[in-house]
Amino acid sequence: MTDTHAAVGIIWRGDNEVLMQRRRPQQTFSGYWEFPGGKIQFGETPAQALCRELQEELGITVTTLQPWLRRRHQYPHGNVMLHFFHVRAYAGVPYAAEGQQWQWTLLAQSPSPLLPANLSLWKWLSLPSVCAVTAAEIFGVEEMIKRMQAALANRLKLVQLRDKNISAEGRRHLATTAATLCRAHQALLLINDDEQLARDVQADGVHLSSGKLAVCDRRPDFLWAAASCHHEADIAKAVTLGLDFVVLSPVNKTLTHVKATPLGWERFAEFATTAGLPVYALGGMTVADIAVAQQHSGQGIGMMRQAWNVQ
Ligand SMILES: Nc1nc2c([nH]c(=O)n2[C@H]2C[C@H](O)[C@@H](COP(=O)(O)OP(=O)(O)OP(=O)(O)O)O2)c(=O)[nH]1
């Protein structure tokens, strides 16, 4: 059966509210909450379809569209390929141009029932644009903690504790302190490749190295689970395990993996569009690359050294 393609808009008000509308009585899944959007018509690109739908449904003219992921869902009535976009700027004031019920919805208050294809996606909306990877191997543990404090105070919301080559005590001390700090700043902490340590310090989740990902046969039992990917096969495995996001590298040249051939942004975009889950770009990233990654369907960027250059 061929897929029906639909373009879907996540319309933001600030950082933690999105516009949701309710499917009307004559539609399938009537009464379910959905993001505005609809079927892509013959000859339209997904972006054109979304702009048309948002004009028709809400009377707004989109001025900035940011492509996000693409996700396939099997409904009883057929397969749908959903093309998601973030909408952060538009002209006009939204109104129910088709008589539908709609509301601004806080991310913490997922409306119910949500269209089934949107369930895991809702959780991913709270992911930030930067994933900072610890670098105690470079700075030392105490300096790393100081820099982490500063970065969290500066609104960092996602930390991956990596540092595989420091002492076990140093890593445990870093993990314990990072867990306390991240909790205090409502930031997520994922521990690289050590489920026991993640459990001991009550981290939010684990981050699998690509090596661990390859041999892992179940989703780690944490609220958040992510992985490092370098190839298509890694991403496919992450999807099979039902992970929440992946960090794909190296996108640009990086000091950490000097011999690796960078993917480049075009190839990154191919992966990020088709992965079906959020993808961060890693490798030679600076803050200026957040926007570049997002224009290429990425969730944002992963950074190691650059993330901690905070006074
Ligand atoms: N607009 C929108 N559609 C979604 C979302 N999630 C999701 O699975 N879909 C599906 C439902 C529909 O099958 C298709 C969008 O088509 P549509 O909104 O034009 O719906 P429709 O009533 O014409 O389609 P049908 O399902 O009743 O045949 O994508 C979402 O968040 N927003």
Image (cartoon, rainbow, N blue to C red):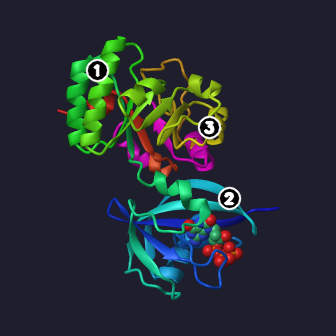
* Residue 273 among those drawn in magenta: yes
User: Quarter of the image holding residue 151?
Assistant: top left
Disc on res. 73: 2
Task: Between label 1 and label 2, give the one nearer the viewer.
Answer: 1
The residue under the point 39% across, 69% down is: 105
Q: Nearer the viewer, residue 175 or 36?
A: 175
Q: Give me the C-alpha separation between circle 2 and circle 3.
A: 18 Å
Return the disc, 2 or 3, that comes first in the chain's sequence. 2
**Residue situated furthest front in the rendering:** 200
Answer with the quadrant where ligand 1 appears in the image. bottom right
**Three-letter code, disc 3:** Ile
In this view, 94 is above or below 14: below
- Image coords of residue 120 (percent x, y): 54, 54
The residue under the point 20% across, 41% down is: 153
Return the disc, 1 or 2, that comes first in the chain's sequence. 2
Q: Quadrant of the C terminus?
A: top left
Residue annotated with mark 3: 235
Helix, strand or loop under label 2: strand
Q: Is residue 35 visible?
A: yes
Q: Which residues are magenta?
A: 267-292
Taking 117 as reference, is 222 left or right? left
Queried on whether the Cβ of the residue with tag 3 lies below 8 angstroms from ligand 1, the answer reads no
Task: Between label 2 and label 3, give the one nearer the viewer.
Answer: 2
Q: Residues within 10 Å of mark 1 (few under 14, many from 20)?
A: some
**Residue situated furthest left in the rendering:** 311
Helix, strand or loop under label 1: helix
- Image coords of residue 286 (percent x, y): 35, 36
Queried on whether the Cβ of the residue with tag 2 lies below 8 angstroms from ligand 1, the answer reads yes
In this view, 288 is above or below 146: below
Residue annotated with mark 1: 173
Q: Residues within 10 Å of mark 3 (few under 14, many from 20)?
A: many
